[in-house]
């Protein structure tokens, strides 16, 4: 039996990540769980170590479906959703914060978006040792135009 460990989006979820090489990031993909049909706009921001927002993309569920996540039309979904940036995001080696937030969205137990934890099929490296599955990092993937 499988399980999905998630953190429901109530207002904001943040995760710190470390980048070890320079990249021109085209998009970010988050592992997302969707329950029923939440309304609103969902924003991903990349924030550098100086607390400056270096990239931001906002989209609705309908826009996500149009961009290729057609399975989102189902009542329940778990998988990857892309936020494709309008221009390449130049990221040098360092520490960044990935922030997921929403506007015109109200969390409820039955209708919500959640960011999945990377507890089972590890893609995201975790610095340190997680003491429980709930302390594992969120599923986050960066896609680059070209590595330098």
Image (tube, grey):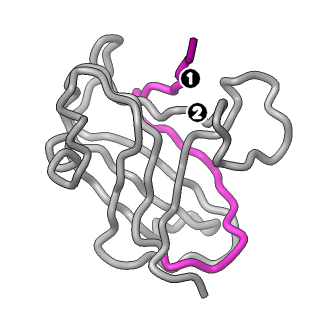
Residue at left 49%, top 61%?
Answer: 46
Residue 19 location in percent, x, y? 67, 66
Q: Which mark is residue 116?
A: none
Judge left or right: residue 141 versus residue 12.
right
Residue designated by label 2: 117
Asked if residue 22 lies in the magenta stretch, the reply is: yes
User: Looking at this view, is 123 or 17 the one in front?
Assistant: 123
The residue shown at (51%, 82%) is 146
Q: Residue furthest right?
A: 128
* SS under mark 2: loop
Q: Quadrant of the N terminus?
A: top right
In this rendering, position of residue 53 left or right of residue 120: left
The residue range painted magenta reads 1-24
Q: CA distance from mark 1 to mark 2?
A: 5 Å
Q: Earlier in the sequence, mark 1 or mark 2?
A: 1
Residue 90 sits above or below residue 19 on the image: below
Of residues 34 and 89, the one nearer the viewer is: 34
Secondary element at tag 1: loop
Q: Dots 1 and 2: beta carbons under 8 Å?
A: yes
Vertical order, 122 against 39 (above or below) = below
Q: Residue 41 at x, y = what percent?
A: 23, 43
In the drawing, what numbered circle is on residue 5? Answer: 1
């Amino acid at each position: 039996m499988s399980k999905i460990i998630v953190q429901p989006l109530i207002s904001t979820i943040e995760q710190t990540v470390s980048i070890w090489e320079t990249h021109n990031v085209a998009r970010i993909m988050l592992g997302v769980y969707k329950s029923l049909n939440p309304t609103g706009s969902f924003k991903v921001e990349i924030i550098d170590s100086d607390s400056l927002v270096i990239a931001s993309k906002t989209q609705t569920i309908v826009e996500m479906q149009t961009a290729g996540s057609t399975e989102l039309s189902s009542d329940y979904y778990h998988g990857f959703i892309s936020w494709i940036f309008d221009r390449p995001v130049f990221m040098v080696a360092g520490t960044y914060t990935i922030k997921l937030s929403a506007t015109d969205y109200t969390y409820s137990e039955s209708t919500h978006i959640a960011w999945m934890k990377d507890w089972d099929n590890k893609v995201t490296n975790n610095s340190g040792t997680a003491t429980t599955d709930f302390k594992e990092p969120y599923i986050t993937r960066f896609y680059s135009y070209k590595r330098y």
